[in-house]
Amino acid sequence: TATAFSLDNKGYIGTGFDGSNYLKDFWEYDPASNTWTQKADFGGSARSGAVSFGLSGKGYIGTGYDGNFLKDMWQYDPATDTWNQTTSAGGSKRNNATAFVHGDKAYLVCGINNGAYITDFWRFDPADQQWTKMRDIANKNLNEDYDDDYNIARANAVAVYVGNRIFLTCGESGSLRSDTWEYLPDADLWEPLKAFEGTSRTGTVSINTSTRGFVLTGRSSTYRFDDVWEFLPDELYDENT
C-alpha cells in the first residue's frame, strides 16, 4: 500500500507495492489546477505499508516493510523538494501502522512485526524531532484499571478526525475489525465507542474536513469495498436507519 498526507493545501502520495516491486516515487496533487507533479523520490528505501503525516510545514514518511520491517523516518521539505532522514520512530519496527496529528504533535500507533501486533504508542514533536512514549494500547499496567478493557492493537487501522477529536477504527488482528476507539490526548487514554456500522474491513482510508470525518473503501478477504461512511460520534445509533 502507498501512503499519503496533505500539506499547505496540496496532497502528496508515495511508496507502495505494485504486485512485483516496492516503490519510492512521490507525487504532489494540486487541487487548484487539478494536476499531478512528480517530485523527488522518497529518500528512504522503496517500501509498502509506511505511515505519513504533514506537520509544521513539512511532510514525514516512515516505518513500513521493504523485505525487512522498518522504523526509519524521513522529512520532506516542499520548498526545496528534498528529503532528509530524521529521528527514527520510537519503539518497535512496524508495518501497516497508523499515524495521526493532533495540535502540533504527531502520533504513531498499531502495526505489525513478524506476526505480532504492536502495542507501544509514540508521540512525535517536530520542534526537537524527538519521540515520547505514551501509554501502551494493551492491558499492561497491573496497578491501574484504565487499560483493563483495551483491545486496540491491530494493523491497517484508519484514523478519523471529527473536529478536534481523534478516532481509530477498522483494521485487522487475525480477523477483521470494526470496533472504534477515541483517543483523548490530554489524558493519554482511549475510550471505546460504537463500532463502525459498515462491514468489518481492513485497508480503509479516511477523508477529513475541519468538522467532518469519512471512512471509505477497504477490503475483506474476498471483497473490495467502494462505500463511503460519515462518522457522527455524537448522534445516537438507530438500528432502524
Image (spheres, rainbow, N blue to C red):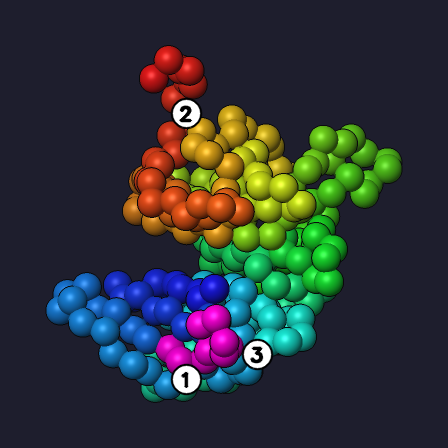
Q: Position of residue 110 (x, y in %)?
A: 63, 53
Label 2: state its secondary structure: loop
Label 3: state its secondary structure: strand
- Vertical placement of 4 versus 192: above or below? below
Residue identified by numbered label 2? 234
The mark that comes first in sequence, 1 or 2, is: 1
- State yes or no: residue 171 in magenta: no
Q: Residues within 10 Å of mark 1 (few under 14, many from 20)?
A: some
> Residue at image x 76%, y 32%?
148
User: Disc 1 versus disc 2: distance between alpha carbons?
Assistant: 42 Å
Residue identified by numbered label 1? 41
Q: Amino acid at mark 2?
A: Asp
The mark that comes first in sequence, 3 or 1, is: 1
Residue identified by numbered label 3? 86
Label 1: state its secondary structure: loop
User: Disc 3 versus disc 2: distance between alpha carbons?
Assistant: 39 Å
Q: Position of residue 223 (x, y in %)?
A: 44, 45
- Please tell me in which quadrant of the rendered image residue 185 appears: top right
Give, as a single range, the part of the protein colored magenta.
17-26
Q: Residues within 10 Å of mark 3 (few under 14, many from 20)?
A: some
SS assignment for the magenta stretch, majority? strand
Q: Viewer-nearest of labels 1 and 2?
A: 1
Q: Amino acid at mark 1?
A: Asp
> Residue at image x 49%, y 46%?
222
Q: Position of residue 216 (x, y in %)?
A: 37, 45
Residue furthest to the right: 142
